[in-house]
Amino acid sequence: MEYKIYGHSGRPVVVFPTSNGRFYQYEDSGMVAELQGFIDAGKIQIWTVDGIDGETFFSPDDNFSHRIERHQAYFRYISDEIFPEIARVSREVNGGAEVRPLLTGCSMGAFHAANFLFRFPWLGDGVIALSGIYSTKHFFGSNLDGSIYFNSPLHYLANLQDENVLRQIRSLRLTVCCGQGAWEDEMLEETRALEAVLHEKAIPAWVDYWGEDVNHDWQWWRPQMSYFLAKWLAG
């Protein structure tokens, strides 16, 4: 597994790629250039991780159990290898202080970022999720067997009763955004569903809907990320 780091200090920002994307996608899409001011000022250090969507959610394999277990292995890689390395580097570049990461992603990356943070809220400080889906129905239909359920936030959050876990999630800074233009229909539906679940569970979140001209594409995700990141860093 490969990853890339941009920046010399500041808040770690973990970036998950879009569907079947690679660790260099954020740079190739122009997002690193979009956020260059934050990077050069030492406000953020971006970590772009690789993905294995082709083996998991987008695999043609009809063995759902195998596909979801590959995803579980991927999340173990993120939690057990990437996050300890982020903590080590963060202490080095931030004067010994360990700064918990902000997670982010666009489209499928938003799903991964939000799902990871909801499952492991003690590992991060918040999320900026842009144009995401938040259930597994698009990949496994109505099947929620085994680990599929525990990777479908709209389902497991709605049923979450553990007050200790809820308290940890409530302490996070959650930013969720979706446009209302072309190719955003499924994402818009699930963003609204996620907003309802968060409200029901008394989980604070900033859920923002951009206009009907705002499409499911990098040309909008770039200004969205700049806007929300500036607000996020301002506190």
Image (cartoon, helix red, strand yellow):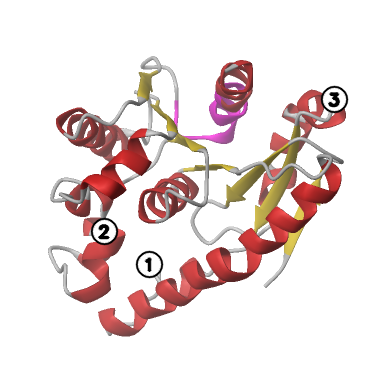
Position of the N terminus, as image quadrant, is bottom right
Q: Is residue 51 above or below residue 175?
A: below
On screen, residue 24 versus residue 207, left or right, reads: right
Camera-nearest label, 1 or 3: 3
Question: Relative to residue 34, is residue 197 depicted above or below?
Answer: below
Residue 57's disc is 1
Instruction: Give how far apart the Cα atoms at labels 1 and 3 are.
Output: 37 Å
Picture residue at 81% right of the left edge, 40% below the top: 94
Pick the quarter of the image with the C terminus.
top right
Q: Quadrant of residue 29?
A: top right
Q: Which residue is mark 2?
A: 136
- Crowding around mark 1 (Cα neighbors within 10 Å: few <14, some 14 to 19, many 20+) is many
Task: Say what secondary structure mark 3 lies in.
Answer: loop
Q: Which mark is residue 195?
A: none
Q: Which residues are magenta?
A: 215-224
Type of residue at label 3? Ala
